Each structure stands twice: as C-alpha cells, then as structure tokens.
C-alpha cells in the first residue's frame, strides 16, 4: 500500500498516465478448488489497493490485467474490483486456435457488460533467422508471427467494444529464464533486440500509418535455398510478400512483370520461381502523384532433386518444417523431406515433447545454431543422398534432447555399408543439451550416399546434416 501511494504521488503530474494498474496475472497456475485461500487473499488486497488508488487520484482509471483463464478471475470476484479489466491473451501461441482470441473477448464482453475491456498483452515469438513456407505455432518463424498478428488485428478491429490493445512487445528483450530459438531472449518483439524491424512491424505500419507505406517482406532474407519443384524445371517456387497501404502493388521479378496484386489487410503475396544465383525483386505502388519502389537481391541456392553435377553443398535441418539462416557463416539450412527423387530421410518422426510446436525449449551448449540442434528426427532408419561420383565432406549434428540415463539411447552408424561409429551414446559421452558434431570424408563411386542408423538401445536420433563437395 505504501509503494502504491508513493508511485501515484511521484507520477501524478505525468500527462501520459491515464490508468493505474497494480496487479498482473495474479492467478497464473491457480485453481479455485485448490488455491482458494491464496486467491481470496489476493482479492482482499486488491480491494484495499483499489480504494487507496481512487482516493489518491480520482481523475484516472484503475485496471488489473489478467491471463486467459476467465473463470478463476470472474468467479473469485477480482474482475469486479477495477474500473477496467485487461486481458493478456496468447491464442495461437501458448493456446491453440487463433480464433480462440475473438471467442474469449466476446465472452468477456457479454459477461462483464459494465467493464471496459483492454487487450493488455498479445504476441508470438519470432527469430529473423527462421523462415517457413508452412508456418506452425511455436516454430519461431517470421511467417507465423506475421500470421498471428494479422489474425489478431482483424479480430480486434471487428469488435468495436475493445477499448484498446497493447502488443507484447515492441522489441525483443532479455529474459534470463527463456531458452527459445535465441537463449535468454523473449522474441515476441515487432523489432529485434538491436531494433531492426521484423516483417510484422511493416504489417502494423500498413494497417495504422496515415503516411504512404510500401515494404518488401522478408527483406533481410537475402540468402535463400530450396529444392527444385520437379525434375522438369530448374527453379524452386517460394513466396514473396509486400506490405503497404496503397490500393495495389506491382512486382517485377528477374525483369518480368507479374500481375498487380490488391493489398488485403495490408499484405500482398506472390508465388515466384527462384532460380540458382542472384534473383532481382522490385515492388512499386502509386500513392497519388507519387510512386514508391523497393528493391532486393536474393542469392538463391537451388538444390536439384537429383543432386546433379552443379551440387556444391546442402544443409538439412532434420525434424523441422523451417529454414534457418546462419548469418555469420552465410549458411542456409533447409527443412527435411522424406526420401524421394534424390535425397531425404527414411523412417522416424519429429521430436515434439511439448503440447505445442516442435523441438526442445532448452539452450544448447557449445553452439549459436540452437534452432538446428533443438530439432531432430527420432527413430530414423536412413539418410539417403543420390550424389554424383566425387569426394565429399559430411558433418552430422547431434544433441541429446532428453535428460535420460546413459545406456538408454545407443546406436551405430553405417556409411555405404561400412561401420562409421560402433556405439554412439550421446548422454554417456557428452551429456544432454550439448552440440555434438561428427565429421567424415567419403568417396562416392556410383552408389550415392546412404547413412544407416542401427538401434542398440532406444531410438537413434540426428539433428542436422551438412554435405560439401570437395
């Protein structure tokens, strides 16, 4: 109570303050049937803080932000105390179903008819090094973050009773307990830790700015890679996005003008055929008498399905659906695929220990490539690459992502019928959550590269593989 009084008196004359909030997510992890004593103690304290706040400053509103368990806050009576009720909601991130966001606030509005409603937090994590053509919840891709916010912006604007909304967060920020794609960073920002805009930043500009807006999405994704669409073509089709508030936008791709696109909720999409080498992107839009243009060069590393003589290297991120750009080494890791027409895995499944997303949420020691080591294929039988004859360097990446006992996971590795490793026990020799690399050279003479994993105890695992032609 003393601290609340001091805060109000110290900041009373700040014109930017319109609401005093004095609690946040007080019942996170609590249940009325189990924690009623603690819950009602908080409710009694909230009444004291509310009374003091209104006495100290009757000119401003009061608010308590709550997490997304409506019943525990409402049934305890906490929602009846402040003048405004705030909700921290993460549907499409911690909770499934993007549309659950709108369903929740509809219910809150119907039940709390006398309370203004504010969305005090909503957001999704994204690492600019991670991209996906098939974004999924909790993959930390730029594309899922953008999809998340596009959905939430639409749902908020459809509901005039929402008095306000605050994105969590403007910038990525330090968070010691987090071990996401970037350890110790909460990556829900619209911009990176060093203040560089992510795609979603441009989405908000396109929706909200009165000034002309035109930006190329994925503007920092200047190195791409992907498999050719099929054996008959020499390109890989991937998406290009533009953000803006003009009526329509034009894309010129490798000097060829593609059809004009209407902006829908600030976004326009094209599917374009990237070829090996430098690809030129240029968008333009008309704003009255003004034409705005944005340009980008993309260095595309095409992976032929038959791994032809043009093959130089391939980096495969196993157990995942996303691309990962290691910027220091300028290496692009592509998603795994089942073996078919040239290369891929045989057998196994993606490591998914949580109720959301894929891979581990642990910091991987001895690497900055956490997104490669946090995902893995479990129970794999074979990795097959139909390489042309030649000399190659192969790097296999491993990390034990389960805190199991030694001897619980042991497997051998065979390369083209020859035993490479007799017994690999990651936990015994390296421990959990440590980046491990096994490197070998191989001469291919007519039979391609076949890496077989033979279980001795438990299921074999592998996190990534890099193959370079020497």
Image (cartoon, rainbow, N blue to C red):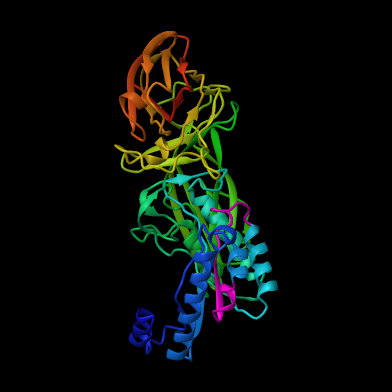
Going 59% across and 69% down the picture, which residue do you hit? 76
Q: Farthest right residue?
A: 110
Q: Is residue 148 magenta?
A: no
Image spot of residue 332 (x, y percent): 41, 38
Q: Is residue 162 above or below residue 264?
A: below
Going 60% across and 79% down the picture, which residue do you hit? 116
Q: From which residue to which does the magenta span run? A: 77-98
Left or right: where 393 falls relative to 207: left
Give the camera-side residue of 134 and 314. 134
Image spot of residue 367 (x, y percent): 31, 38
Can residue 402 be seen?
yes
Left or right: where 208 falls relative to 297: right
Image quadrant in which you'd find residue 89:
bottom right
Can residue 288 be seen?
no
Going 65% across and 81% down the picture, which residue do you hit? 114
Q: Is residue 94 magenta?
A: yes
Q: Is residue 469 above or below residue 99?
A: above
């Amino acid at each position: 109570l003393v601290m609340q009084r001091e805060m109000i008196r110290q900041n009373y004359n700040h014109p930017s303050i319109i609401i005093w909030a004095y609690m946040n997510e007080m019942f996170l992890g609590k249940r009325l049937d189990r924690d009623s004593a603690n819950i009602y103690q908080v409710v009694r304290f909230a009444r004291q803080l509310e009374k003091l706040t209104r006495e100290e400053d009757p000119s401003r509103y009061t608010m308590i932000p709550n997490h997304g368990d409506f019943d525990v806050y409402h049934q305890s009576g906490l929602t009846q105390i402040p003048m405004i009720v705030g909700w921290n909601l993460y549907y499409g991130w911690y909770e499934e179903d993007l549309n659950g966001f709108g369903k929740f606030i509809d219910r809150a509005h119907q039940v709390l008819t006398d309370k203004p409603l504010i969305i005090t937090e909503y957001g999704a994590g994204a690492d600019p090094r991670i991209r996906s053509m098939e974004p999924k919840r909790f993959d930390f891709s730029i594309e899922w973050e953008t999809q998340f916010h596009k959905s939430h912006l639409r749902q908020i604007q459809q509901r005039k009773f929402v008095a306000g909304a605050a994105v969590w967060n403007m910038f990525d920020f330090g968070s010691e307990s987090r071990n996401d794609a970037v350890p110790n960073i909460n990556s829900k920002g619209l911009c990176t830790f060093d203040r560089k805009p992510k795609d979603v930043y441009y989405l908000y500009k396109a929706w909200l700015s009165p000034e002309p807006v035109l930006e190329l999405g994925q503007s920092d994704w200047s190195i791409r890679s992907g498999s050719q669409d099929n054996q008959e073509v020499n390109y890989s089709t991937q998406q290009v996005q533009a953000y803006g508030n003009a009526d329509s936008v034009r894309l010129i791709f490798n000097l060829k003008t593609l059809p004009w696109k209407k902006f829908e909720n600030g976004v326009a999409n094209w599917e374009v055929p990237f070829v090996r080498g430098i690809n030129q992107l240029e968008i333009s839009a008309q704003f009255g008498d003004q034409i705005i243009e944005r340009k980008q060069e993309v260095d595309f590393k095409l992976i032929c399905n038959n791994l032809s003589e043009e093959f130089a290297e391939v980096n495969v991120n196993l157990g995942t659906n996303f691309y990962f750009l290691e910027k220091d080494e300028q290496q692009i890791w592509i998603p795994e695929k089942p073996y078919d027409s040239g290369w891929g895995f045989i057998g196994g499944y993606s490591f998914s220990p949580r109720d959301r997303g894929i891979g581990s949420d642990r910091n991987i020691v001895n690497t900055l490539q956490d997104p490669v080591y946090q995902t893995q294929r479990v129970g794999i039988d074979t990795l097959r690459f139909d390489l042309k004859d030649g000399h190659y360097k192969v790097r296999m990446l491993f990390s034990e992502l389960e805190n199991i006992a030694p001897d619980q996971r042991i497997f051998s590795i065979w390369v083209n019928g020859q035993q490479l490793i007799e017994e690999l026990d990651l936990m015994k020799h390296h421990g959990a959550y440590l980046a491990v690399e096994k490197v070998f050279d191989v001469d291919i003479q007519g039979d391609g590269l076949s890496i077989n994993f033979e279980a001795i105890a438990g299921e074999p695992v592998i996190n990534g593989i890099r193959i370079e032609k020497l």
